[in-house]
Image: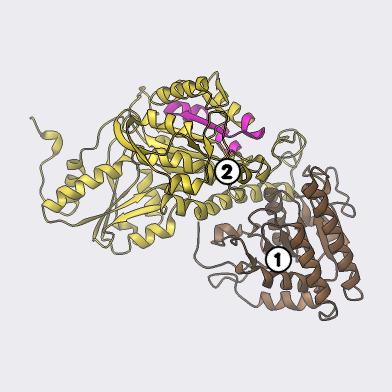
Chain colours: A brown, B yellow
Amino acid sequence: MNHPGHYMVRPGPEAFLPPAAAAMGNALPDPGQAHINGRIVPEEEAFQEAARMFLGGTVPTIFPGPLVLWAWNEKAKKKATAIKFLYDTLKECAPAGAQPMLIPMPDYRPKYPKINPEVEINPNHPNLTIWHNKIDVCMFVGVHCHQANLSLKIIRGGTNCYTIAMCAQAGHEDACLSFRDASVEKIMHLAEWVKKLKGTVPFGALKKHVAALETQDRAGGVRS
Amino acid sequence: MDSHSIIGTKNKKGQVYTDPNHLFFEAPRIPSFFTGSEVIKEAIRRASVDLMVAYPITPQSEAAALIGELYAEGYVTDYMRGENEFGVMSECAGGSFGGARVFTTTAGPGTMRAMENFPMWSGARLPIEMIVTCRGINSPLSIQPDTLEMYFLLETGMLVWHAETAQDFYDWILMGFMVAEQPDVHLPIAICCDGFFVTHTKDVVNLTPVDMCLPPYDPYRSPVPCMDMECPPVRMMRDPFVMKSNYISYATHASWQQEIRAAIERSRKHTIPLLGGLIETENADAEILIVSSGTAVSQGREAIRLLAEEGLRVGLVKIKSVRPWPYHEIREATKHAKHIFVPEFNVAGWMAREIKATVPDSDRVVAGPQVAGGMTMPPEVIVEHIQRTLGKSVATLAARGS
C-alpha cells in the first residue's frame, strides 16, 4: 500500500519486521538527486551528509560487494581502486578513537553453520557482522540491488547502524541515505567531502544525530 | 550490452534500435486493421524478444502460432514449445535467468496450471512478460471470456495490467518490457486482456513503424546476478536460509517478499508517464461512477451514453494497472461519488472487493453487474443495474423476447 509523504528511514532497531520504505510511499531519487532519511535532496547535500555521518561514527565501515570486488570489467577495477581510496581517506580523516573498517560481501550465499563476522558480511544475516563489530555507520557499494535492499532492511530492523547506499542503479529507499548512478567520480567526490570535513565532526557525533532523529515521527504520527 | 549505446544502430532485420520514448510518443503511427492476436504479433515484431515459449490454449493459441512466424522470419531469436504450461513457465524462467528478454502467452486453465512459477519468477526478479488472454477456469470446461484468473495473479508479485482495447494491448506490450526491466522494478509482468473480445475482434490500431524496435534487454542491470548457480535465488532449495528454522531465516524470507512488493510500488514511477497514469477518468465529479477495467470499461462507456440520454450523468474510472494498485488515485477519483458501480466479467467480483477495501464509506460500492462463463455484458444490463439500485422501476433485459 502506498502512502503519501515520505517515511523517515533512520537507524533502528525499528521493528520485528519493519516495512519496506517503498511500501510506505518513499520514492527513489531522480538523476542528480539523492535521499536523506527518505527525503529527496540535491546530490551535493547528500555527499556532505554522508561524509558527516562517516566522520561521526565510531566504526565507520564500507561493505564492497561482488560487483566491485571482482575484476570482471575495467569499470569494476577502477571503482575498487576508488573505494580503497575512500577507505584510506576515512582512516586518515576520522577522529581519534574511530576504527574505520572495510569488510567485503564477496557473494550472497548464506553462510552456515556460521558466518565469520570479522571477515565478511552476508545479505541474509547482515546484522551478525554489524553487531559483532559494533558498526554504527556503513556504506554498501557494488552490491546487487535486491541483495542490498534485503540487507538494508534487516539492518534497519534489528540494529542501530546508520546505512548509506552508493548504488550504481536507481538507489535504495531502505538505506538512511542513498546515492544513485554511482561512479568512480562520485566515490572520489565523497572522499573529497570526508577530507573537507576532517576535524569538524566530533568523535561519536553520529550518536547525537541519531538520537535527534529519534525524536521525530517516522510517518503518520507513529513513533516506533 | 549497454542498451543506450546501441540506440540508432540496426538489428539483423534492419530495424533501428530506438529510444523507447521516441518510439512510443513521437514516431509516426500507421493505422492498421487487426485482430488482438495479430496485434500481439506486431508488438512482438518490434520488441527485440530473445525467447518466446509457446503452448496452445484458447484464446491465445493464434498469437502463439503467429509469433512462431516471427521466429521463422527472424524477428524473435528463439522459439520453443513447452510440454505444458508448467513447463512453459519453467522454460521462461531458465531463459530469463540466462539474461534473455522472454515473452509468453497463456490463458485460463493454462494460467492455473503454471501458477507455481509466477511467485518464483517475481522472487527471482525475472522480468518476463506474459500475455494473459483471460478465459473461464471453471468446470464444466469453458473457453469463453472471464476474468477470474486475474484474481489468482494479484499476489504473485507480478505487475498486472488490464488492457481495454487492442490499442492498449499493442502499446502496453511494448511499454511493459520497459517498466518490468527497470533495475529498481525487475519483475515479471502479466498484461491481461479479455479473451475473444480483444483477441478475436478486429479494430483499428495505430502501429509504430516496423523498421523501429525496442533496445535489447540489458541483464547486467539486474538487481540479482543474472546467472549464478551458487547464489540465491538460484540455489534455493538446497541451501539454507530456506531450510533453517530460526528468526533470521524467516526474517530474510519476509524481507525478500517485502522487497518484491516494494518493487511493485517502484514501478509506479516508470508506469505513470508511459500509461498516462494508472487510471483514466471521465466526469469523475459525477455522483454516480462506473469503475472497472478491461472491456467492462468499454461497456461502461456505452452505458454512460445511454444513461445520459435519460438525463442521468455518470462518470467513469478506467483502471489500467491492477498491480500496482492505484490506491490513492481511486480514492481521489471517487471522492465525490455517492454510488460506485463495478461491472465485471467474473462471478467473484474481485475488482469490487479491491475497490471496497480502498475507498472510505465502502457501502457506496455496488458490486456489479457481474457476468461470467462467457456471457456478454450488454450496456443495457449496466443501465438496468444502476437504475434498479437508484430505486427506478425497470424491465429486465433477459425477459425481452418472452
Reply yes or no: does residue B102 show up in magenta: yes
Chain letter for mark 2:
B
Determine if residue B359 is in view: no
Name the residue beneath numbered marker 1: A12
Residue B7's disc is: 2
Of A151 and B163, the residue lying toward us? B163
Part of the protein shown in magenta = B95-121
Chain letter for mark 1:
A
Residue A65's disc is: none
Reply yes or no: does residue B202 show up in magenta: no
Determine if residue B375 is in view: yes
- Dividing the picture into quarters, in which one does residue B244 lie? top right
Query: As shown in the figure, which amino acid type bears the numbered disc 1?
Result: Gly
- The answer for how far apart the CA atoms under marks 2 and 1 are is 44 Å
Tell me the residue at 56%/69% (across/down). Answer: A219
Question: What is the count of numbered marks?
Answer: 2
Examine the rendered structure and indicate whether residue A113 appears above or below residue A191. Answer: above
Q: Secondary structure at mark 1?
A: loop
Query: As shown in the figure, which amino acid type bears the numbered disc 2?
Result: Ile
Of B177 and B110, the residue lying toward us? B177
Of B77 and B300, the residue lying toward us? B77
Give the image location of residue B167, x and y in percent.
36, 40
Examine the rendered structure and indicate whether residue A43 appears above or below residue B62. Answer: below
- Dividing the picture into quarters, in which one does residue A189 lie? bottom right
Is B208 left or right of B232, judged from the image as shown?
left
